[in-house]
Image: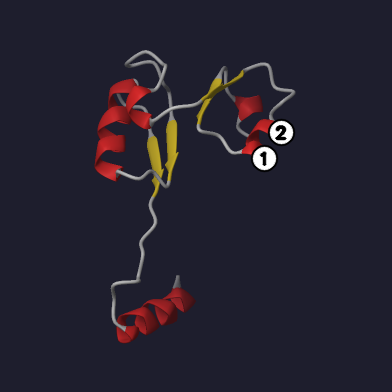
Amino acid sequence: MVAQKVGHLHLLDALVVARQNLAHASNVSFHLGSVGDMPVDDNSLDFTFSHQVPDTRAAIRAIATKLKVGAPFLAYLCYALDNRSWRYRAIWRFSKLFR
C-alpha cells in the first residue's frame, strides 16, 4: 500500500511476509540492522513509522536525525499490563468498549 505511493521505501528488519509482498517493487530497500545504525543519510526521510522497537527513547533519538525538518514520525507503542493488578487490567479492558 505504501510502496506504490512513495519515491523510495526503506524497510529495516522487515518481516519475511513484507519481503514476499514487496519482492516485485523496484523502489524498496530492505536493511538488516538496528534503528541506531540505519543506512540512510541524516535529514533525508520524508516520513517514518516505527513499530515495537526495544528501546523507544533511543529509537526516537536515532530516527529524529534521519527525518527532514517537519517530517512526520508515527510510532506504534505497546504497553504491557503484566505488572498491573487484576483491577487495573479489568478497567483497561472495560474502557476498550468506549474507544
Q: Amino acid at mark 2?
A: Gln
Residue depicted at x 39% and y 22%: 38
Q: Nearer the viewer, residue 46 or 11?
A: 11
Splitting the image into 4 quarters, where does residue 50 fall?
A: top left
Q: Which residue is mark 1?
A: 17
Q: SS for tag 2?
A: helix
The residue depicted at 38 percent of the width and 52 percent of the height is 77
Q: Nearer the viewer, residue 24 or 6?
A: 24
Name the residue that disc number 2 marks: 20
Residue that protrudes farthest toward the top in the picture: 41
Name of the residue lying farthest toward the bottom = 87
Q: Which mark is residue 5?
A: none
Where in the figure is residue 51, as x and y percent of width and height?
44, 44
Protein image colouring = secondary structure
Specify few, some or many for label 2: CA neighbours under 10 Å numbering under 14, 14-19, or 20 or more: few
- Identify which residue is drawn at 29% across, 76% down: 84
Quarter of image, res 96: bottom left
Q: Local crowd at mark 1 within 10 Å, few (<14), some, or many (≥20)? A: few
How far across and how far down the image is residue 67, in percent?
Answer: 35, 23
Q: How many marks?
A: 2
Could you tell me if the residues under marks 1 and 2 are in contact, i.e. CB atoms within 8 Å? yes
User: Percent from the top left, x then y, of residue 36?
Assistant: 32, 28
- Look at the picture and state if 89 lies above or below 20: below
The three-letter amino acid code for the residue at tag 1 is Val
Q: Is residue 88 left or right of residue 10?
A: left
Q: Does residue 74 show up? A: yes
